Amino acid sequence: MTVEQIFSECFNIPVEQVHDNIKYQEIEKWDSLNHLKFTARLEEVYDIELDMDDIINMSSVKKIREILQNYGVAA
Amino acid sequence: MNIDQQIDQLISEPQYQFTDAEKEKRLLPVIREQLKSHYRNNRHVKSWLDKLALDIDRIPSLAAVPPLPTQMFKYFDLQTSPGELQRILYSSSTSGQTPSRIPISPLTAQRQTKALAAIIKNHFGAKRRPFLAIDSPASNREARGITARGAAIRGFSILAREMVYAFDDHDGRMVFNEERVRDFFRRHQAEEVFALGFTFVIWSEFRKALLDANLRFHCPNLVLVHGGGWKKLRAQSVSKEVFSGTLAGLLGSRPENVLDYYGMVEQTGIVFIDCVAGHKHAPNFAEVKIRNYLTLEENGIGQPGYIEIMNLLPDSYPGMSILTEDVGEILGADDCPCGRKGKYFVFRSRLEKSEARGCGDTFREN
């Protein structure tokens, strides 16, 4: 599963509309609660364990991609 | 650096590093700017400051920033940011009283999340862990606004690797879910478990449920963090020691792992968690003052008085100097055995004669 697919599924937007510049809280569903559901889903799909700083720093799709790369996930 | 950048820096720098004197220097210029902005953006703040005839640029010290009583959030709309709000937080409204209404902008909410994470990280580390919320999911549901209980769970949940609620919600009543709690401890008891709840809920509901079901766990690395009022427990003669000892016994942890936090809905994003020495410390972006009951002058070390919290996080309400009805005492500055710098204090009680505020937002009794 790509990060776009997971993002699309969690925040309820069409996958083709997911792009690097989307920022936290810019779309309605991306609030603090759904953010935690989303990060839990990332952990499940990629079998990784994020720490608190990662979760805070995942403030845009671009940042999410960068952080996942630190865990060896080619997202 | 503009003030937004200065605030971001205060949040992102390592916490509890400023000495008392450094804090004065770092916080005062930011608070002056915030006051000016609040003055421009809210007519109630304007008339308050006009009446005080305050020259904001000449405020000489943090202690000279005028304290704003918490009750003002009940009577006035104190929104100070022009844009749309993210949410509104409410404090308790015991028996028909007006609840406080705290407007939260997107910027305030973002800072609160980051600030709380910085505090949690300083106390517990960045590693996320199994999380037992001693509450029902209903407390954390966003309808028109969420309460202090919901805000606390939501804020701390960043520490959760897996979140489990100990209670279900049945028609507004909390019902203990024994099977889910058993299952949680079965899977995680050897790990560093984090449990969070309101003091009164933990004592009157959770403890009772464990006793009724004759449940004991063995979770030596469990940390139980609890907040909210002590008033109802004190009425039942439950001291902090009895509370910590009883819960540690039931959960198989140590009394030192049961940590009290002080926080309030007006200061979401900031919690004052007991350090190993049992003291509370203000993070970089906040300060604590104790004010004399009669004169409201700043009290020195060892003199109890009203707790005032200075909070630099919000742009959407005046949080820079909120005077509570709580009683506390500064025990010292810069020399706490835990190593954190700045003033350290203890919470004593809610003021005896204050209007009944409920225990933060502990329990609606209807």
Image: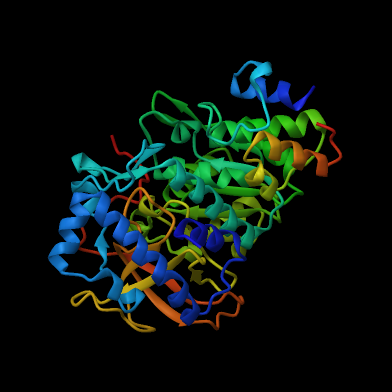
Q: Which is nearer the eye, B203 or A29?
A: A29
Q: Indicate left or right for B170 with B255 as reference.
A: left
Residue B265, image x, y percentages: 38, 50
| Residue B89 can be seen in this image | yes
The extreme front residue here reads B1
Residue B51, image x, y percentages: 13, 64
Q: Which is nearer the eye, B53 or B188?
A: B53
Residue B56, image x, y percentages: 27, 69
Instruction: State which quadrant residue B363 falls in.
Output: top left
The extreme left residue here reads B51
Q: Residue at 32% of width from left, 76% of height from top?
A: B63
Q: Which is nearer the eye, B213 or B258?
A: B258
Q: Residue at 63% of width from left, 15% of height from top?
A: A14
Q: How is the image coloured?
A: rainbow
Is B275 situated above or below A38?
Answer: below
Is B58 situated above or below B195?
Answer: below
Is B190 situated above or below B125?
Answer: above
Total labels: the figure holds 0
Please identify the quadrant where the C terminus of chain B is shown: top left
Residue B96, image x, y percentages: 19, 39
Q: Residue at 77% of width from left, 30% of height from top?
A: A44
Instruction: State which quadrant residue B365 falls in.
Output: top left
| Residue B183 can be seen in this image | no
Instruction: State which quadrant residue B71 falls in.
Output: bottom left
